[in-house]
Image (tube, rainbow, N blue to C red):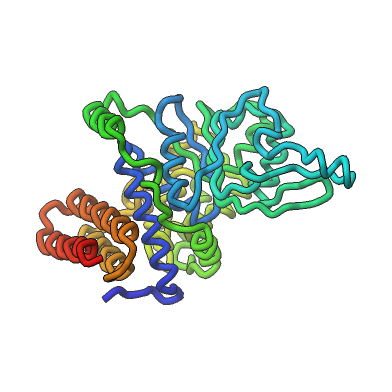
Amino acid sequence: MTTTPAGWSEADLAAVRRLKALGRSVDQHFVGRRLALDLLEVAVIAHEHVLLLGPPGTGKTDLVSRFAAGLGGRPFVRLLTRFTEPAELFGPVDVPAFQTEGRYRVRTEGMLPTAHVAFLDEIFQSGSPILNTLLTVMNERVFHHGHEAEPVPLITLVGAANSLPQDPSLLAFADRFLLRLTVPPVAASRLEELLAKGSALARGGPAGGDGHEWIDPASLDRLGRQLAHADLSGVAGEYAELVRELVGQGVTLSDRRIIRGLRLVAAAALRAERVRAEAADLWPLAHFWSDPAHAPVVQEAVRRRTGGPGEQPDEPVRRVRRLLSEARVLSRQVERGSPPAAVERTLRQLNALRLELMRVVPGEQEAARELASIIDTTLALLDQG
């Protein structure tokens, strides 16, 4: 029987599990990008923005596109240059409205102001008119049409660049990206895996998000509102001590980053299906540094408090219980007479859980048998339908 944490509804719990299932699904198409997906999951819960740093050709665009496709639609994707015009991001001026009504408006359909997820490559290459508008969109979730203000549904904006800019004015803009991650090439250390993934994609692997909506934006909005109910009392002292230590070592942290860092902790707790945050939920803070030179100091300080880098530490037994709990919830979402597409989608999610179980605890036979039984029962629904 699945236990729902106090303060959560079954819908909230199911939304978190669908989000994590999406991350596992996308992870199957990549090598060495699990941490990037973990951060994207935290970012969409917290409604914060992510900056991916690294050379071209490391799969950043494909990763974000596949992830965003599972959120109910394609992301708004653009490669920016110093010649990019604002209309290429926000839409062209509505000329008929200006001519007939004398009203200045922008036609935003299909452009960034209507997107739930946006990916802007070489984001620091754009000019100040674009950056100033992006600041308002990212901070206030508003796009201005002359004297009118239009709310935007943006959940997260992911930016990519080779490195952080040196221009002080651009650094102020970069500070809006609360989470940062360096995405290096993996060919040198994991070439065989990379070639195997590339071969599978060449044979016609599925498109982003496996072509399905895993979690809708409305559910993500509800999870974002749940952050206000997260209990941070158990980590407040630890968080304050961490900030003092980092500032004392000369790490640059703006007041904005310090305050909003608590949202990352709350989001990590909700992602771990906890209402009350624990020390392990500090793990995203390893990626809220401002200066790349300070990243090792921040990561080490966080590691000492969480027990390890990346995803929060977890006992194998607890991981197994969580995987089985997710499988049981998934199995209850389909029944005899469910559309074949829904059953097939659930089977894909269950298979992703099976693969994770094999990776986390390879010798766990009892859990493997139960999961195999759930998969067989779900598979039988296709024959009954």
In this orientation, does residue 251 appear? no
Left or right of 192? Residue 11 is right
Of 91 and 184, which appears nearest the observer?
A: 91
Residue 149 to residue 296: above or below: below
- Residue 45: x, y in percent? 49, 57
Q: Residue at x 52, y 38 (%)?
A: 51
Q: Residue at x 50, y 53 (%)?
A: 44
Residue 1 to residue 354: above or below: below
- Residue 236: x, y in percent? 49, 62
Left or right of 310? Residue 75 is right
- Where on the picture, by quarter, is residue 380? bottom left
Of 175 and 223, which appears nearest the observer?
A: 223
Of 112 and 266, which appears nearest the observer?
A: 112
In this orientation, does residue 128 appear? yes
Q: Residue at x 76, y 52 (%)?
A: 149
Q: Quadrant of the N terminus?
A: bottom left
Q: Quadrant of the C terminus?
A: bottom left
- Residue 37: x, y in percent? 40, 45
Number of numbered tags placed on the structure image: 0
- Where on the picture, by quarter, is residue 125? top right
Residue 378 to residue 76: above or below: below
Q: Residue at x 72, y 43 (%)?
A: 107
Of 186 and 240, which appears nearest the observer?
A: 186
